[in-house]
Image (spheres, helix red, strand yellow):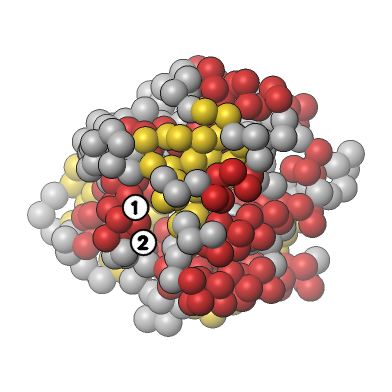
Amino acid sequence: MTEKNIKDGANYSPEGRVETVVEQGQFFFSVAFLDHGHIYAQTNGLVQAGATLKYVYDTDAKRLSDFCDKFPQVEVATSFEQILQDNQTQLVASAAVPNLRANIGIQVMEAGKDYFTDKSPFTTIEQLQQVKDIAAKTKQKYAVYYAERLHNEAAWQAGELIAAGAIGRVLQVITLAPHRLSKNTRPDWFFNKEAYGGILTDIGSHQVEQFLTYSGATSANINFARASNMNNPDKEGLEDFGEVSMTGDNGASFYARVDWFTPDGQATWGDGRIFILGTEGSIECRKYNDVARQAPASKLFLTNSNTEQEIDCSGKSGFPFFGRLILDVINRTENAMTQAHTFKAAELSMQAQNLANKVG
């Protein structure tokens, strides 16, 4: 992990182990619209799992050049339509401006390909419904890069332990998700609420996805939600703080805080934490660093009737999501993440945002 990657969350791209599930030339994907740096992590995960990167398309010459430097095997497409019409491309990965992601996905699915977008996958409930309709019609996949669980070993291992019964039935999930603002490096759309959808729609979608995964809830009621600009009056469109509370349909409790207040003195771009309470134990994840001890770090602390232990997750579980996604595309299965789960995480985060908009 480079110094830039651990300091700047927009370009965070983990380098951990990914199981190869296909050989070169067996599975092709292309990349389009490079507005957010997460596209590097999305691409790297797929390449590490054995996928063959074919085309890249973007309207910005500098972004294209930088991407080709990182992935020199890629061929530059002359248009997005070239990717849509390419018979070899099975999956299109994208990290466009958030409010454009749904329409791009619709074009991809109508072209008979599966879509893998950065989070947040939508900025409005109307976009979600449009995509649901197209997904049902075309039977194509609309996959989402919920990186805070899918590309973090402590967060992934927490899910494995919960599934194995290590802490019993989950009663509550708390996620804390501070991010470094890096205001001077952000594009204009980052400060346009219509473009990014609000902080609960954006960063909040990660948190809701983790709650649904760990708790086993399939839906939730929103108890309260708040989003505001607390310390950046020069950027009126920015929400730099948000919080939400939900109760899952299985009774599990959820609270999340999301913000853009990671201090410059911190070694990593964010001190993401998860606290999970179960009937028979608890888990804490220190996802990106262990303050004043280690950075980067991916640690898990497990306590139950049998043990009390600190687990270093770095290099242990790897990142299975990418290989599973490839196999899901090939086999038309849902082992990486179900479509219902993908949509519900986004839906609840947007419902929370809408409530916060009314309150605020």
Q: Which mark is residue 29?
A: none
Residue at 32% of width from left, 50% of height from top?
A: 326
How far apart marks 2 and 1 lie (CA) works out to: 8 Å
Judge left or right: residue 314 versus residue 213: left
Q: Nearer the viewer, mark 2 or mark 1?
A: 1
Can residue 174 be seen here? The reply is: no
Residue at 16% of width from left, 61% of height from top?
A: 164
Q: What crowding class fits label 2: few (fewer than 14 Cα within 10 Å), some (14-19), or many (20 or more)?
A: some
Regarding mark 1 in the picture, which secondary structure is present there? helix
Q: Which mark is residue 325?
A: 1
Is 185 located above or below residue 270 in the figure?
A: above
Q: Nearer the viewer, residue 206 or 336?
A: 336
Q: Are marks 2 and 1 in contact (CB under 8 Å)?
A: yes
Judge left or right: residue 226 versus residue 108: right
Amino acid identity at mark 1:
Leu
Q: Residue 327's x, y, as percent?
A: 28, 53
Judge left or right: residue 155 versus residue 102: left
Q: Nearer the viewer, residue 321 or 333?
A: 333
Amino acid identity at mark 2:
Met
Q: What crowding class fits label 1: few (fewer than 14 Cα within 10 Å), some (14-19), or many (20 or more)?
A: many
Q: Residue 202's x, y, as percent?
A: 63, 54
Dot placed on the residue nearer the N-terminal end, 2 or 1: 1
Residue at 72% of width from left, 30% of height from top?
A: 60
| Picture quadrant of residue 127 | bottom right
Q: Quadrant of the C terminus?
A: bottom right
Residue assigned mark 2: 337
Q: Residue 234's x, y, as percent?
A: 89, 39
Is 2 located above or below residue 338 in the figure?
A: above
Residue at 48% of width from left, 27% of height from top?
A: 74
Is 337 located above or below residue 136 in the figure?
A: above
Can residue 184 be seen here? The reply is: yes
Q: Residue 272's x, y, as percent?
A: 48, 42
